[in-house]
Amino acid sequence: MTFSMINRRGFIQGSIAAGAAVSLLPTSRVLGANNRINIGIIGCGGKGNAHIGWFSKIKNLSIVAVSDPDKRHMSGAARRAARGHKVAQYQDFRKLLEDKNVDLVVIATPNHWHAPLTVMACQAGKDVYVEKPASHSIWEGRKMVEAARKYKRIVQVGTQQRSDPALIEMKNGLARKELGELQWAHALWYAYRNPIGKVNGPTPIPKHINYDLWCGPRPVVPLMRKRLHYDWHWMWDYGNGDMGNRVIHNVDDIHHVLQLKTLPTRAMAVGGRFGFDDDAQTPNTLFTWLEGGTIPIVMESRNLPLRKVKKGKRGTTSIYNRFNRKHRFTNIIKCEGGFFAVTRGGGGVYDNNGKLIRRIKGDSGAGHAENFISAVRSRKVSDLNADILGGHLSAAMVHMGNISYRVGKATGVDQVRDRVKGGIEAKETFKQMLSHVKANGLDINKEKLILGPWLTFNDKTERFTGEHAAEANKYVREDYREQYGIKDEV
């Protein structure tokens, strides 16, 4: 069977199968500067509720509908969204997409739903604000771009740091070569996390959750972890690990401030799930080395603490020591005369010894939602700070690294050292990764250290070529259940 497909016919058939009749015609309406805009929220967990708070503050805007396979999440969100008006509740998102009272949708679902829902919303005539990472795989990210352009939809990605003045200032400083020529970049985000535990058999699905809808494009399989919600981040079928959960923000910053127009042509990843014996699949320590673009780029995530944690206590987040500075969550962009270390909320410009030259202040992207609404009113894609095209390319960089890891093999420390010796920042990153693992009381020689192969990427076809391409390309485009898939031609 070929990849299952969503087109207008499939959308209608799937909706009828769920008991929802859908119009063939788009449901959008022309919005003037003073027209009230009606929003539907799809995905009512933690991030969906955050969006309720953000969008509720914008004038001439109402949240009129919410949707979630979890009825409890949905009803709670409806109560929070109500501002003297009734909020419609649709457990089946397809009924929300057919609601002609909804002008645009905010998608805050697990990652595996981002692309199918975005394509379906564009086909239904809705504008879209979709959470990061834009896509769950490289191919579907491109389909999101195609759908947005074909149906003339405004599609913003929830990488709100693009709206932070600090990142815009860094972009300008790099463009005017404040510190001279570029050398390399390192996007890192360290977040302490505990193991998710192990189960001996399937975890029951509560009756208030429509598990078929939750799985959506993925196969409906028994739940083999303790928690359905949030821990999906660490399962390949639904999430992309912390690289797609947290580090994607800083990867997108690199894409933004360097004003990249194409993707790197080579990717290699190193890491593992060190010290954890749980049901999760994604690594808890990982870095990717990207080459073939403007400059070499390292993307890195760590979930282990700074040092081994005593029983019953919580560990502090790990650190990266570079140029006499301690970094936990930032973008280090090295130039001839020093470096920028700027991320959400601000940072600074430093000389090569780590001495502060000047500070850069930010606001964490507080105006990102307003930027989206302004573009919805103007109908100009150029008004968006985080258009879907940039979101697709940034997510693709994360996917390239994850794919190298997934086709990688367990190896020894010396083999990795030999591989990274030619990259200044990759070599330093691996050196500190080893110290980080040791500080947690772990023997790296007994851990499963994965070395991914160098993968060559064609940014025109957005597929891998050369050695290991056959295995790597299996992850570029994924299988979908028929009623929830994406067609080649959106």
Image: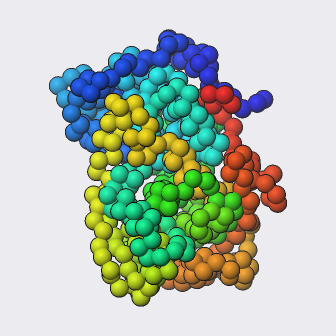
Residue 455 occupies which quadrant of the picture? bottom right
The percent coordinates of residue 296 (x first, y second) are: 60, 69
Please state which of residues 221 and 405 is positioned toward the viewer in this rendering.
405
Instruction: Confirm whether residue 259 shows in the render.
Output: yes
Q: Quadrant of the C terminus?
A: top right
Q: Residue furthest left?
A: 84
Q: Quadrant of the N terminus?
A: top right
Question: How many numbered callouts?
Answer: 0
Q: Residue sitting at 21 percent across and 23 percent down?
A: 85
The percent coordinates of residue 61 (x first, y second) are: 26, 30
Residue 241 against residue 483 in the figure, above or below:
below
Residue 291 against residue 218 in the figure, above or below:
below
Instruction: Confirm whether residue 276 shows in the render.
Output: no
Q: Residue sitting at 28 percent across and 38 percent down?
A: 55
The percent coordinates of residue 426 (x first, y second) are: 60, 76
- Figure coloring: rainbow
Please state which of residues 159 and 218 is positioned toward the viewer in this rendering.
159
The percent coordinates of residue 389 (x first, y second) are: 53, 44
Residue 129 occupies which quadrant of the picture? top left
Q: Residue sitting at 37 percent across and 45 percent down?
A: 47
Residue 366 against residue 307 in the figure, above or below:
above
- Residue 337 relative to residue 64: left or right: right
- Residue 129 relative to residue 59: left or right: right
Q: Residue sitting at 82 percent across and 57 percent down?
A: 466
- Residue 329 relative to residue 138: left or right: left
